[in-house]
Image (spheres, coloured by chain):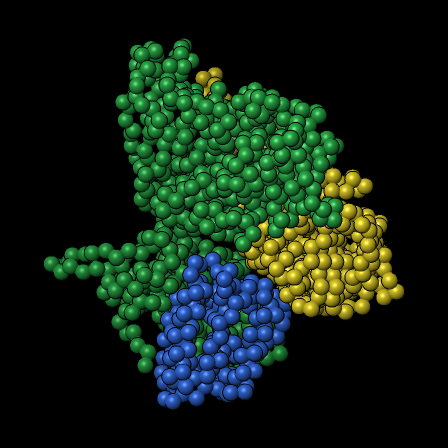
Chain colours: A blue, B yellow, C green
């Protein structure tokens, strides 16, 4: 029944003070966007180390959007730290020849419906152009 | 059906001041009832775009507080409800509250808006969009409303029954009657807020008559992410304006309107809107006609300086009259104070009246709380105890006590909570003592 | 390739997961095939029961969960329903009612983030819902019970500063039933308010109003006051601050009949701070008549201990060998009400110090005060003042590059908020005291914004105050007039109310409406780890969300320590600060969310990386342990100071630190699960 099989998958890490509420607002407005989007609530985006993003690509995600509150973050240092980590993730991505545009950091506010849709659509457009992520080593298919 | 509620504090008004006062009292362990006349809490602030001087999105500040008052264990939230009568004495008030019928059973409605989708009638949205947007006859007030519950504008309903069929929880009840709640409370906090000066109040400015003369709150809705249009436009032709004028003190510091005071927020909101418009319309010229720029709060002067640096024009001048040309462009007749009061005419394509604040409600007849000559609640000791009213046990906060911005409203909400809490503490302590004494005397009898 | 963490601490008990998919009365169910999702999820390992239900939030829905916990031994709950912001609390309390730790439940948003945004794609929406739930189930396997961080809190607050804001907040906290210690650095209460002649908008005598407030504070049994006292050391965190106070000796104990004589015999003469130097005092003195505490005080800096006063005073009244004392306090919260100081103009700034006829607005207050140095007569140098110019925005609204910076390189680019109305009020008072005086008011903008303030502006106009407007770039010049002139000073203004004409005003006195600067409190900033803003006033967390709280839990701000305010605004801010303190301490316990950093002692090798990057003060420390004769270092979290931002988790080279409830391994498991194969089943959608 895996109807999303073969389509690009987008992981959205959305902070509770920003992007996650933005996604909720989009839902409250009943606006359509593609269902290949998997939104995980996070408290602060600074927790993710660069290897996490690489692991997510390896597991089969083709694009990642980190939707945080940017400079409006309630956490001191979150935005700076997240930017640093995303930059080191870019370094690792370069080494693995992964298109850097597959990982995007976006400031999304709690009622940012249009910016939310915009980010999702732009990432989908990009994945439409550059196609799913081709791994040099095939992704492991564990049996759980 | 009548319920009775015994509480420590009744907060009247669910705008930012009332919400914050409720939270600050409830966080101290007191039982609070918050009564709001509109179907959602949030007040005027819920409709704003971004806020000065941080340019935070306004909803990001209101929505968490709105949901906090709805979920707080010590707060009973009553929306779409109005106080009917206040009886009793200092420290022991009996208040009757009417819950107006929504024609939707609040406990059943899941806020899914299926009813809205099938409702065949659109009505202009005066409450939230100043008539520039629309809602259905059955509707959830706005996307971030708390509670997320529908209501029916029964006067305009044609009883087609479509919503009845669409509703999955059988929440619709056309025969719903008002409900009454009797509240026994130690204290009352009035957070009844303000209203803006009607923009047609000053006839010379043509508000309501000239199509391209709008007021500040309309522009807020154009700028807000939740607004009806999502872009900037002028009303006559929907075109993007590129030469915008702000008319300051349109309803403040104007003895001809009987308003002799400064409304405190208009300078800053005009500057903020000008900055947001300059961001949305990079080619537009924006001019602010002012008497004095009152950027007095923390970080406000720097905000004003930033606006000047962005190229927003500030002209010290009093606008005497607005007319329009054949293309409905507003023409401002301005007395240039900086130039020996020379009078000039300036053509713009959109004029925004920076309307001020008027008292929202006169509490005297209902609460026995008099207002001052400006119409806002009178404070017997404004310097040391700014939240006291002339009546013991009744307190006031936010713009019910005079024009103020959001920061100051939130601060006075904290202050009123402290004042009311001390009152409740002494009063309940006293009541307990009396109760103990009574008990003792009974035992001895 | 990325490390695999088999050793990452596994939950201690075998997870028994209950899965619940809400139909939401069709809101979810009309798009997502809820029954199928529930059936598919039931096949996953550890899932012991899986349901779909029309309304999970309803009582029957909640009871389903409670029964499963009690009867089927479910110990992890995953619910797919509407937004977590709507019902997370609802389900958390349901889980708790069933006797399970409320943090062993995970919420997946299937309405706002699935059914409402994928109407057109029911199949794919169902697939997405299934995968999101699989993610939740994977997380559930890792979840551990969490307890809110609970800290005992002393029902006792320290208020630093005995000005109007400190007094008002002490009163409000005490009236709520908490203990308050109020310390004031100087030897009397009331701060700058005592020095004002009058207060707007009521035109009351400031000292009368202040006296009323002080009397209320003194009558409050919960308040202990120490004057001449300062904080010298602090330790601890919210609920439990240990504070060392140093109290300077007063030298004089109580009132005595021949005080005047004791003062008269003192040979030392000093400028009287209370009158901003417009009068003098002795080294044994009283700040002003009627001040609290009332007794005289010794100015130790200038006292030569000559003993003359001791000889005159009754035995034991004066002790010139008194020592300072130190004592310790344990308090749950601290209010910083450290106030402001008036801006001190630079030498020559509009004639300041260059010409004795240039004074500040604060000095004008003293000059017009009936109990002031000239007994309220508007005299200067023994002569009645005829014409006076008030210049606004001295030390406020300064522009870098235009205004001369202060010695520390700063300019004050903010508005001081009170000077306009104060100037208007004083201008009218001058006209009352000297009806023939000409008053020139030289301003940039008149900011009489507050309730009743505009009346002062209008009144000044009625009193025939002459207004001239200058631009910040063209600062008015104050110069010495020709000797032949009958006014000693000349003020040159480029007036923008008259086409920018340069106007020369001959005057007797120039009043500089100086603004507010924060009192220098670098010592307190260092000890309490609070931050000043760009304007050097103390900084709040957020002007609207948390307007009186600092970034340090339990330290709040009141009054002009935070920014320029008038008396009314200071009192309101003091009340708001008191509300926060009361809410924090009233239960005798502070409860914080459990989402704080946790260190895995097995993995931490004391690299110190986390401490290096941690943005919170004192949330993480490196401590030395000795176990089985081996000494090593390890990071230790102080939960009270941690806000769970997770920066530490992102930088630890050993993955030894994580945020409880939001662990990295949980996220990794979720990512894996979302991309996993969905279990096959017969007759699927």
Q: How many marks?
A: 0
Indicate the quadrant containing the N terminus of chain C: top left, top right, bottom left or bottom right.
bottom left
Give the residue at the far front of this rendering: C484
Report x, y in % for residue B161: 75, 64
The residue under the point 61% across, 51% down is C473
The residue under the point 38% across, 63% down is C646
Relative to C344, residue C638 above or below: below
Left or right: C283 as drawn, with respect to C427: left
Given residues C181 and B428, the one toward you in this image is: C181
Report x, y in % for residue C59: 52, 57
Relative to C5, residue C444 above or below: above
Residue B12 in view: no
Report x, y in % for residue C132: 47, 73
Location of residue C396 (image quadrant): top right
Give the residue at the far left of this rendering: C629
The residue under the point 79% across, 47% down is B341
């Amino acid at each position: 029944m895996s109807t999303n099989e073969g389509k690009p998958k987008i992981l959205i890490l959305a902070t509770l003070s920003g992007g996650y509420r933005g996604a909720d607002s989009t839902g409250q407005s009943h606006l359509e966007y593609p269902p290949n989007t998997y939104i995980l609530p996070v408290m602060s985006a600074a927790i993710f180390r660069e290897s996490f993003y690489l692991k997510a690509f390896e597991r089969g995600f083709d694009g990642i959007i980190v939707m945080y509150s940017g400079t409006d973050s309630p956490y001191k240092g979150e935005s700076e730290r997240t930017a640093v980590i995303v930059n080191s993730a870019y370094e690792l991505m370069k080494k693995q020849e992964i298109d850097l545009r597959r990982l995007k950091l976006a400031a999304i506010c709690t009622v940012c419906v249009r910016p939310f849709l915009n980010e999702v659509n732009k990432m989908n457009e990009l994945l439409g152009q550059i196609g799913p992520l081709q791994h040099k080593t095939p992704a492991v298919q564990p049996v759980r | 059906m009548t319920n009775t509620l015994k509480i420590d504090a009744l907060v009247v008004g669910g705008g930012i001041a009332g919400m914050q006062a409720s939270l600050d009292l409830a966080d101290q362990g007191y039982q609070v009832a918050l009564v709001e006349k509109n179907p959602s809490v949030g007040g005027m602030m819920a409709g704003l775009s971004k806020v000065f001087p941080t340019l935070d999105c306004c909803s990001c500040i209101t929505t968490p507080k709105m949901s906090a008052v709805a979920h707080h264990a010590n707060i009973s939230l009553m929306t779409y409800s109005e106080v009917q009568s206040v009886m009793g004495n200092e420290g022991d008030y009996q208040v009757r509250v009417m819950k107006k019928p929504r024609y939707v059973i609040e406990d059943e409605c899941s806020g899914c808006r299926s009813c809205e989708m099938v409702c065949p009638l659109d009505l202009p949205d005066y409450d939230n969009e100043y008539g520039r947007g629309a809602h259905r006859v059955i509707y959830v007030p706005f996307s971030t409303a708390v509670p997320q519950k529908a209501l029916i504008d029964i006067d305009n309903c044609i009883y087609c029954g479509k919503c009845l069929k669409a509703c999955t929880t059988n929440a619709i009840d056309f025969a719903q009657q008002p409900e009454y709640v009797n509240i026994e409370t130690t204290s009352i906090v009035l957070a009844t807020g303000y209203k803006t000066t009607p923009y047609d109040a000053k006839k010379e400015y043509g508000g309501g008559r000239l199509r391209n003369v709008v007021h500040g709150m309309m522009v807020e809705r154009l700028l807000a992410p939740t607004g009806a249009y999502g872009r900037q436009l002028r009303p006559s032709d929907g075109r993007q304006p590129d030469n915008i004028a702000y008319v300051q003190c349109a309803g403040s510091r104007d003895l001809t309107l009987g308003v002799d005071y400064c409304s405190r927020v208009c300078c800053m909101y005009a500057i903020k809107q000008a900055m947001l418009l300059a961001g949305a319309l990079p080619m537009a010229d924006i001019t602010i006609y002012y008497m004095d720029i009152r950027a007095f709060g923390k970080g406000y002067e720097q905000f004003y300086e930033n606006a000047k640096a962005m190229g927003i024009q500030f002209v010290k001048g009093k606008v005497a009259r607005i007319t329009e040309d054949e293309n409905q462009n507003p023409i401002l007749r301005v007395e240039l104070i900086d130039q020996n009061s020379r009078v000039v005419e300036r053509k713009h394509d959109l004029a925004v009246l920076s309307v001020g604040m008027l008292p929202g409600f006169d509490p005297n007849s209902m609460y026995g709380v008099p207002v001052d000559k400006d119409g806002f609640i009178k404070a017997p000791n404004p310097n040391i105890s700014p939240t006291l009213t002339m009546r013991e046990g009744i307190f006031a906060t936010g713009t019910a006590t005079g024009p103020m911005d959001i920061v100051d409203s939130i601060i006075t909400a904290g202050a009123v909570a402290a004042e009311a809490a001390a009152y409740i503490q002494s009063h309940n302590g006293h009541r307990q003592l009396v109760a103990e004494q009574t008990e003792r005397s009974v035992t001895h009898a | 390739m990325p490390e695999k963490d088999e050793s990452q601490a596994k939950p201690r008990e075998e997870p028994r997961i209950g899965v619940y998919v809400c139909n939401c009365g069709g809101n979810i169910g009309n798009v997502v095939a809820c029954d199928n999702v529930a059936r598919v999820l039931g096949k996953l390992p550890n899932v012991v029961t899986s349901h779909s239900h029309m309304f999970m939030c309803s009582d029957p829905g909640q009871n389903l969960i409670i029964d499963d916990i009690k009867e089927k031994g479910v110990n992890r709950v995953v619910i797919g329903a509407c937004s977590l912001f709507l019902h997370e609390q609802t389900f958390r309390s349901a889980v708790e009612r069933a006797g399970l730790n409320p943090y062993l439940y995970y919420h997946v948003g299937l309405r706002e983030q699935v059914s409402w945004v994928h109407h057109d794609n029911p199949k794919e929406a169902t697939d997405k819902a299934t995968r999101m739930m699989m993610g939740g189930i994977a997380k559930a396997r890792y979840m551990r019970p969490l307890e809110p961080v609970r800290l005992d809190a002393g029902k006792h607050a320290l208020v630093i500063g005995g000005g109007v804001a400190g007094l008002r907040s002490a009163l409000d906290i005490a009236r709520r039933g908490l203990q308050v210690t109020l310390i004031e650095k100087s030897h009397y209460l009331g701060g700058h308010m005592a020095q004002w002649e009058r207060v707007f908008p009521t035109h009351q005598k400031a000292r009368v109003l202040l006296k009323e407030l002080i009397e209320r504070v003194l009558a409050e049994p919960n308040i202990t006051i120490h004057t001449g006292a300062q904080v010298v050391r602090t330790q601890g965190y919210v609920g439990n601050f240990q504070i060392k106070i140093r109290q300077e000796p007063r030298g004089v104990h109580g009132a005595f009949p021949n005080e005047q004589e004791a003062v008269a015999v003192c040979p030392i003469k000093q400028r009287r701070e209370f009158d901003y130097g417009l009068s003098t005092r002795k080294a044994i003195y009283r700040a002003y008549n009627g001040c609290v505490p009332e007794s005289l005080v010794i100015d130790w800096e200038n006292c030569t201990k000559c003993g003359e006063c001791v000889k005159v005073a009754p035995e034991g009244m004066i002790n010139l060998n008194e020592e300072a004392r130190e004592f310790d306090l344990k308090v749950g919260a601290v209010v910083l009400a450290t106030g402001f100081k008036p801006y001190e103009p630079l030498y020559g700034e509009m004639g300041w110090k260059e010409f004795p006829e240039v004074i500040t607005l604060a000095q004008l207050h003293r000059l017009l005060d009936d109990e002031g140095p000239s007994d309220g007569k508007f005299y200067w140098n023994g002569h009645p003042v005829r014409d006076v110019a008030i210049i606004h925005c001295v030390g406020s609204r300064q522009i870098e590059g235009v205004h001369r910076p202060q010695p520390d390189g700063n300019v004050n680019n903010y508005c001081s908020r009170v000077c306009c109305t104060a100037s208007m009020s004083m201008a009218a008072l001058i006209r009352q005291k000297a009806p023939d005086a000409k008053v020139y008011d030289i301003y940039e903008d008149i900011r009489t914004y507050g309730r009743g303030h505009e009346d002062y502006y209008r009144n000044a106009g009625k009193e025939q105050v002459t207004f001239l407007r200058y631009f910040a770039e063209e600062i008015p010049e104050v110069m010495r007039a020709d000797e032949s002139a009958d006014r000693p000073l000349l003020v040159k203004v480029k007036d923008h109310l008259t086409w920018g004409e340069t106007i020369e005003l001959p005057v007797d006195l120039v009043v500089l409406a100086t603004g507010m600067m924060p009192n220098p409190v670098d010592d307190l900033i260092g000890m309490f780890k609070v931050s000043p803003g760009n304007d050097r006033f103390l900084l709040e967390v957020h002007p609207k969300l948390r307007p009186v709280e600092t970034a340090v839990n339990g330290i709040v701000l009141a009054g002009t320590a935070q920014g320029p305010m008038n008396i009314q605004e200071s009192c309101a801010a003091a009340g708001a600060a008191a509300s926060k303190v009361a809410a924090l301490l009233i239960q005798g316990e502070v409860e914080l969310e459990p989402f704080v950093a946790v260190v895995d002692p097995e993995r931490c090798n004391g690299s110190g990386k986390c401490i290096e990057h941690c943005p919170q003060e004192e949330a993480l420390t490196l401590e030395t342990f000795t176990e089985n004769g081996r000494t090593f270092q390890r990071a230790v979290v102080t939960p009270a100071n941690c806000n769970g931002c997770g920066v530490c988790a992102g930088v630890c080279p050993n993955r030894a630190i994580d945020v409880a409830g939001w662990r990295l391994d949980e996220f990794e498991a979720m990512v894996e699960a979302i991309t996993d194969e969905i279990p096959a089943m017969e007759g699927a959608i």
